[in-house]
Amino acid sequence: MARSRRLLPLQMNEFAQRRPLIVDLLVFIAGALLTLAFAPFDLWPLAILLPIVLLWSWETATPRRAALRGGLFGLGLFGFGIYWIFISLHDYGNAPAPFAALATLLVVLVMALYPALVGWLLIRWGPAPGLLRWLLAFPALWTLLDWVRSWLLTGFPWLALGYSQIDAPLGQLAPAVGVFGIGWATLLSAGLLWMLVNRRDWRLQLGGFGLLAMLWLGAWTLGRVDWVEPTGTPLRIAIVQGNIAQDQKWQPSVLDETLHRYVQLSLPEHGHSDVILWPETAIPMFYEEVRPFIGALAQRAQEDGVDYVTGIPTGSWETGIFHNSVASIGATLNFYHKHRLLPFGEYLPLRGFFMFFRDWVTIPMADFTPGDRDQPLLQAGGQPAGVSICFEAVFGSDIRRALPEATWLINVSNDAWFKDSTAPHQHLQIARMRALEVGRFMARATNTGVSAIIDDRGRIVIQGKQFKEDMIRGEVQPRRGLTPYAHWGDAPTVILMVALLIISLLINRRTLATV
C-alpha cells in the first residue's frame, strides 16, 4: 500500500508526459469547474482542490506548455464565469450576436492571460517542482497578478479566488488581509495538499498537516476578533426593489409609472424607517429635469423624518459633464458622484481607437464623467455612509477610503443588465466581502435583485427575491473603528507576496549553486 502511494506521483507525471493533450483538456475542465466555487453555487472547497490540477500539469511542462495550460485554466474559469457580458451587450445593448460574442471572448482571453503568465513565469524563472514552488512561488505569484488585475487597464478583479471563501473558514481573514490575502491562503492550502500527495517523507507530511491546521485555525481565531464596535442606535432601513424592466427603464413614456411605483412602495414606510433606499438610477432622468419631483419628495421626507437615498444621473447638456450619482434627500440634499466608471458601459476608453464600439452597441448614459476621488460622505439617518455604485463594489481599495468616518455602507446597483445569470449573485458575494473587510453593515439596493442587508461579518441578514417588486426591511447597526484591512489596505499582502517570491528565488539560486 505504501509502495503504491509512493508510485502515484511518478505515475501521474508519466501520464502528463505521455498524454499532454488529455492533460490540457483536464486543465480546461478544472478551470470551468472552478466557477462552481463562487456564488450562486458556493462549493468553496473546489477553490482549493482544482488549482492542484494546474500544479500537477506544470510539474513536467515546458514554459510554453505551462503558459498554454494556465491560459486554458483561465479560459475555463472566465469563459464560464463572466459569460454574462454577452447578455448585456446583445440583449440590452442591441449588439449583433457575433459582435457581442467576439467582445465577450476578447475580455475572457485578456483575463486568461493572467494565469497563463503565472505558468510561464513559474516554469521559466521559478524553482523546480517541490516545496519552494508549491508553497512559496505559486501562491505568491498568482496572488500578486490577481492584485495587478485589480488595477491594470482600469482593473477587473472579478472572480478573484478569495471571494469563493466568504462562507469558509479562510474567509475570516478578510478583516486582516482582504480578498487577495484570502486568495493567497486558499492557494497555499492547495499547495500543502499537493505536497502531501507528492512527498514520501512522513515528517514532511506531518509538517504539512501542521501548517494546514495552523493556517485554518489562525483564520478561525481571527474570525472571533471584534475589530470594530457599535456606535449609536440601529438604523431602520427600507430597500425598495422596483423591478423595472431594463428594456423599458430609459423610455420617457415609462418615467411617470416608474416614479409612481417607487413612491407608492415607499410612503407606507414613512414613520417606520429612518432611511429609504432606492437602486442605481432609480430615477432615470437627470436631476435638473426632475427638480419639482425631488423638491416634493424632500418636503415630504422632512415632514416625516425620513431620508431617501436614490440613484439619479446628474449634469447638464450645457456643460457636457454628466455623472452617475446617488442623492441623499431629506434633512439635507447631498450627492455622491461615481468615481470608478465601468469601461465601455459608462465611458469609452481610448476613444479614438474604440469609437467603432458605439456603432455596434447602444448603451444609455454611456458618457459619464468620473466624480472626484475624495468626496464628502453622504449623511443618511443621521450617520455618515460610504457609498458605492454598482461596479465600484468590486474595489476594496476604494471602499476603505470612506473609513473611519463612515459608520455604514450603501451600495446601489442595477443588475438587470445580466438577466437570470450568475452575475447578480457574484455581485452580491463581492458586496459581502466588502462589508466583511471593513467591519461595516451594508444596505444594498438593486433594480431587479439581489437586494439585501449585510452585517459587519459579511452575512446576509435579509435578502429580497429576484425579478419581483419587493420591499426589504431591516436594521443596520452603525459601527466605528478600523479593521487592519481598512487601515492598511492591500499593501501588506502585496509586500508579503513580493517578499515570498524573492525568498523563493534566492533559496532556489543558492540550491542550484551548491549542486
Image (spheres, rainbow, N blue to C red):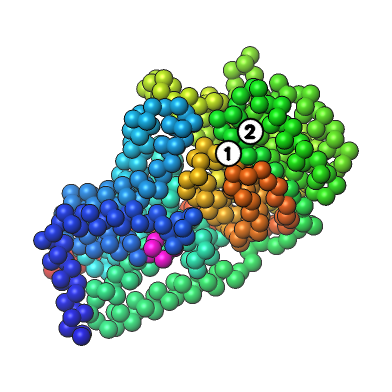
Task: Judge from the rendering whether residue 29 lies leftward or rightward of residue 496; answer left or right.
Answer: left
Judging depth in this view, the residue of 330 and 468 nearest the camera is 468
Do the numbered discs 1 and 2 sit on residues whose CB atoms are within 8 Å?
Answer: yes
Number of other residues with Cα within 10 Å of mark 1, as a class: few under 14, some 14 to 19, many 20 or more:
many
Residue at position x 55%, y 50% from top? Answer: 428
Q: Is residue 513 above or below residue 490?
A: below
Coordinates of residue 113 in the picture (x, y in percent):
30, 44
Query: The residue under label 1 is which amino acid type?
Result: Asn
- Identify the residue shown where x is 66% and y is 34%: 282
Quarter of the image for the C terminus: give it: bottom left
Residue 371 visible here: no
- Residue 203 lies left or right of residue 478; in this view the side is left
Considering depth in this image, is 375 or 87 the residue closer to the camera?
87
Question: Which residues are the magenta region?
Answer: 44-48
SS of the residue under disc 2:
loop
- For disc 2, the marked residue is 281
Q: Residue furthest top?
A: 318
Categorize mark 2 by other alpha carbons within 10 Å: few (<14), some (14-19), many (20+).
Answer: many
Q: Amino acid at mark 2?
A: Thr
Q: Is 144 part of what is drawn in magenta? A: no
Residue beneath disc 1: 414
The N terminus is located in which quarter?
bottom left
Q: Main secondary structure of the magenta part?
A: helix
Name the image quarter holding residue 352. top left
Identified at 68% across, 46% down, the residue is 470
Q: Position of residue 259 (x, y in %)?
A: 72, 31
